[in-house]
Image (cartoon, helix red, strand yellow):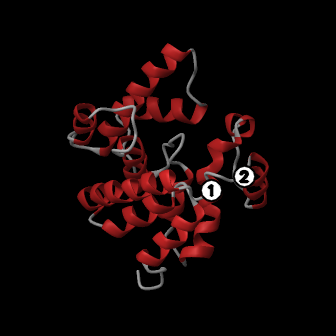
Amino acid sequence: MSNLMDYTKLESVVKKHLKPSRFEHSKGVAKDCSELSTRFLLDKDAGLYTGIFHDYARYYSDSEILKACRKGGVDISKEEEEKPMLLHGAAAALVMRDIVGDVPDSYLIAIRNHTLGSINMGLLGACLYVADYTEPNRKHLDDKDRKEILSLPTLEEMVLNILEREKKYYKEKGMTFAKRTIELYNFLLGGGLFNS
């Protein structure tokens, strides 16, 4: 990991780029993702780096996001084309290597997929997905629900629990999952496992 930017320096770079509330969220995600990645991957740094950086492009405009993603050769789904903010993770992943150094592909894949999820997001991506959803500054969960999710024995069970909650919420709001999220839901329902 010595070829990566020092984490404290990276945190300071991210802090200058995000609004205070979004930075606090990112710090919380970094902490929680680090705990999950230590638990499941034995690599706390992976969780720290992806957690702090996952929302780096959150304040890019739709046109900036689409321009960056098209230039970077990102495979853009119909839902992402219609709502470019869903691509803020993909845009963040594109700039991460320039800012952080020669990061493992697993970091970039995790950040790219933290919004809609993916069957290909890997264990680190699942850690980030769970941490982003359960981060304590979020108001859609209470402590009981948060503990329930985090106490599940596998990342697959945690992600599936989150997707069940999201499915119920979307149904109440008359919304539907993105194609990629449906694919992930069905993959996990069928017993699919994330690769390392």
**N-terminal of the two: label 2 or label 1?**
1
Type of amino acid under label 2: Ile
| 140 and 125: which is toward the camera | 140
Quadrant of the rendering where the C terminus is positioned: bottom left
| In the image, farthest residue toward the front | 20
The quarter holding residue 39 reads bottom left
Q: Which mark is residue 57?
A: 1
Callout 2–callout 1 Cβ contact below 8 Å: yes
Q: Amino acid at mark 1?
A: Ala
On screen, residue 195 versus residue 173, left or right, reads: left
Q: Secondary structure at mark 2?
A: helix
Which percent across, then down, holds residue 63?
79, 49
Q: Is residue 142 left or right of residue 79?
A: left
| Residue 65 tag number | 2
Q: Nearer the viewer, residue 145 or 161?
A: 145
Residue ID at (42%, 46%): 132
